[in-house]
Image (cartoon, rainbow, N blue to C red):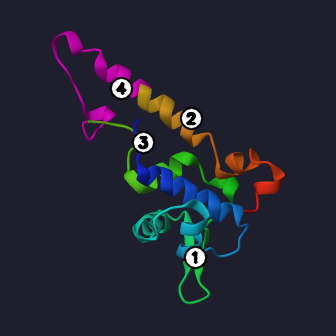
């Protein structure tokens, strides 16, 4: 599995918004808090909002908040929101590839990798990640 800048920034943004505890967080604040380029955030936040992981309020006092509790949003949810599949083979879903000859067993291996990745990422919530933070940094 390749963790792209897009995946990494999406997770950082979601964790920062979750850590805000329901307070609206705007894109400039997210950029400053996490060191994410401000120009990178709008399309990323759009995808997270479209996936119903974020809610937004427009305007000068607007910003983003989680659309549901941090205990109900998994790492897998975030990853899928910004890239679709959790894993792929040459840009295709693991379930759709086939091989011949000596490589016949590869699809089974790739499906196992996909299943294990999904199991891991769907089993970790934003709350789980926030709970691993020391108390003094959880609200930052």
Where residue 76 appears, as percent x and y from the top left, is 52, 46
Q: Return the x and y of residue 27 as percentages of the image width and height.
A: 53, 73
Q: Earlier in the sequence, mark 4 or mark 1?
A: 1
Point out the tag, 1 or 2, that comes first from the N-terminus: 1
Give the magenta range.
90-112
Q: Quadrant of the N terminus?
A: top left
User: Looking at this view, is 61 or 140 the one in front?
Assistant: 140
Q: Mark 3–mark 4 contact, CB under 8 Å?
A: no
The residue at which mark 1 appears reads as 26
Residue 13 drawn at (x, y percent): 56, 61
Residue drawn at 45 percent across, 65 percent down: 37
The Cα–Cα distance between marks 3 and 4, rounded to whole angstroms, is 12 Å
> Which numbered disc, 1 or 3, marks the residue that appears first in the sequence?
1
Q: Decide: few, some or many residues near mark 2? Use Cα within 10 Å; few <14, some 14-19, many ≥20.
A: few
- Label 4 vs label 2: CA separation? 15 Å
Above-or-below relation of 52 to 120: below
Label located before the other in sequence (4 or 2): 4
Q: Quadrant of the rendered structure where residue 110 is?
A: top left
Distance of label 1 from label 2 (alpha carbons) = 30 Å
| Alpha-carbon span between mark 4 and mark 1 | 39 Å
The residue that label 3 is drawn on is 86
Q: At numbered mark 4, what does the secondary structure look like: helix, strand or loop?
A: helix
- Front disc: 1 or 3: 1
The residue wearing badge 4 is 110
Q: Residues within 10 Å of mark 1 (few under 14, many from 20)?
A: some
Q: Horizontal placement of 85 versus 90: left or right?
A: right
């Amino acid at each position: 599995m390749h963790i792209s800048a897009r995946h990494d920034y999406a997770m950082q943004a979601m964790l920062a918004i979750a850590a805000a505890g329901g307070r609206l967080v705007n894109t400039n604040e997210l950029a400053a808090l996490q060191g994410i380029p401000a120009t990178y955030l709008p399309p990323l936040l759009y995808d997270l909002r479209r996936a119903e992981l974020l809610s937004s309020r427009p305007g000068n006092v607007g910003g983003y908040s989680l659309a549901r509790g941090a205990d109900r949003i998994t790492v897998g949810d975030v990853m899928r929101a910004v890239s679709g599949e959790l894993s792929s083979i040459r840009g295709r879903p693991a379930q759709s590839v086939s091989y011949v000859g000596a490589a016949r067993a590869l699809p089974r291996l790739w499906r196992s990798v996909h299943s294990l990745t999904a199991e891991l990422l769907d089993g970790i919530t934003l709350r789980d990640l926030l709970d691993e933070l020391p108390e003094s940094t959880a609200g930052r």
